[in-house]
Amino acid sequence: MMQIDALLKDCDFVAVATPDNCGRLIGKRRPVADWPMLRADGMAMPDFHLVTGLENRPLANMAVTGEATGFHNGRLFPDPSAAFRSPAEPRTAYVLAEARHADGTVCEQAPRQILAAQIARLAAKGITARAASELEFYAFRAPFAALRDTGFAGSPLYHRGGDNDLLVSGHGAVFYGAIVAALNASNIIVDQMQGEAGPGQCEINIAPLPLAKAADTHAAFKHLVKAAAHGLDHAVTFLAKPFAAEAPSGGHMHLNFARADGINALADEGGLTAFGAAFLAGIVAFTPGLVLLSAPYQNSYRRLQPGSFAPMRANWGFESRSVMLRLLGTANALRMEFRLPGADVNPYLAYAAVIAAGLHGVEANATLPPERDGPPLPADLTEAVQAFEASAMATAAFGPVVKQHLAGLARHELAASRCAISDWEIRRGFEEA
């Protein structure tokens, strides 16, 4: 992210945007001359973004907005610290915004605010967090429109997987170079990148940042990658499991936590601190009720299967890629890798879920089970919705209004998935049923 004044110097437009429930950036482009007014008074914006589904259409029967309210305008108040540029639009600056209601009150159902509320709870205990996302995705030589016409088949960036194979990943150098250039233009630092197991699959890791900025950067990253692909007549997908026979795409999240004096809050020379053990125990104990916030679609659960390097239990372990919560490093260098999310994750909601579960563990003085032990995770979206709605911890952490809102969004997604008819069903039963 960049300083707004430097960004605006050679711009014609400023795009004020807020992340919606899917993590997409929703907003409007305004002439750059409007910036002083936008910064002071915000920008009127229909509040559809609070209730959009994956198809980016407003969902019915949601409490926060809808036909009953007339889909009234809210306001987006730009956050000057959350600005970036896209080489795809060289004369436009993007600025992420806080979503407010028309009366100026902050909208608690907005993804950025859901995370902000959990960060505030963490700060009340004298703890700060830094985080970094590592996102996997599939890249294709064909553009989005052509892939849609062919049923999203074929044309991977390279014809075979190249898991850490530098020769294979090097064949995508032009495309990956465009991505890195786009990230560099917005001061988003790439920590590392590598080929992954599937044909045309890549992983790019972003350098650690304060937690709120890390989530904003995650959202900007996906926007910039898609724009870079479009500019080269390529396409990408962040779907968690786009191909039945190929590797899924993860969206792992690395976090570390520090006290006010900068000392690691999770561990010291003697091992896990009391706070650290209880915080991790809370994540293990309460994540099954919050999986919905890390795995939002029916397809998300196609990834959470045996042999996929994705977790099926809420468990933990040191330096283990087979658990949900992987601990790396020791003492003041200890950090955690949350391996539950796929690449389809909304970062604001998943980070909020981690903090909420961990803090509930601290407040309940939860006991950390032995390594690799832990309850099973929901097997599909139906179980995840049921677990979330039954979670008293979710009500306590997010409040009944936000919990009802998130459950309502998930119910719509579940209903859509139940109406879908897959190619597999047709092939399997067309003649035999």
Image: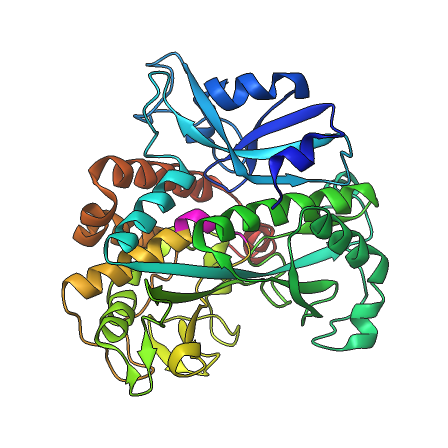
* The one of 51 and 128 positioned closer to us in this rendering: 128
* The one of 231 and 182 positioned closer to us in this rendering: 182
- In the picture shown, does residue 72 fall above or below 47? above
| Residue, far top | 70
For the point 20% across and 38% down, which residue is it? 400
- Residue 6 picture quarter: top right
- In the picture shown, does residue 195 fall above or below 239? below
Judge whether residue 155 can be spotted in this image. Answer: no
- Residue 37 picture quarter: top right
Image coords of residue 118 (percent x, y): 31, 49
Image coords of residue 334 (percent x, y): 41, 77
Q: Would you say residue 36 sits in the magenta stretch?
A: no
* The one of 286 and 426 positioned closer to us in this rendering: 286
Figure colour scheme: rainbow
Lateral position of residue 163 relative to residue 334, left or right = right
Image coords of residue 358 (percent x, y): 27, 63
Image coords of residue 301 (percent x, y): 45, 59
- In the picture shown, does residue 147 fall above or below 354? above
For the point 68% across and 36% down, which residue is it? 7
Count how many numbered circles sit on residues in the image: 0
* The one of 391 and 364 positioned closer to us in this rendering: 364
| Residue, far bottom | 270
Q: Would you say residue 346 sits in the magenta stretch?
A: yes
Lateral position of residue 117 relative to residue 336, left or right = left
Q: Which residues are magenta?
A: 344-349
For the point 36% across and 59% down, which residue is it? 128
Judge whether residue 397 can be spotted in this image. Answer: yes
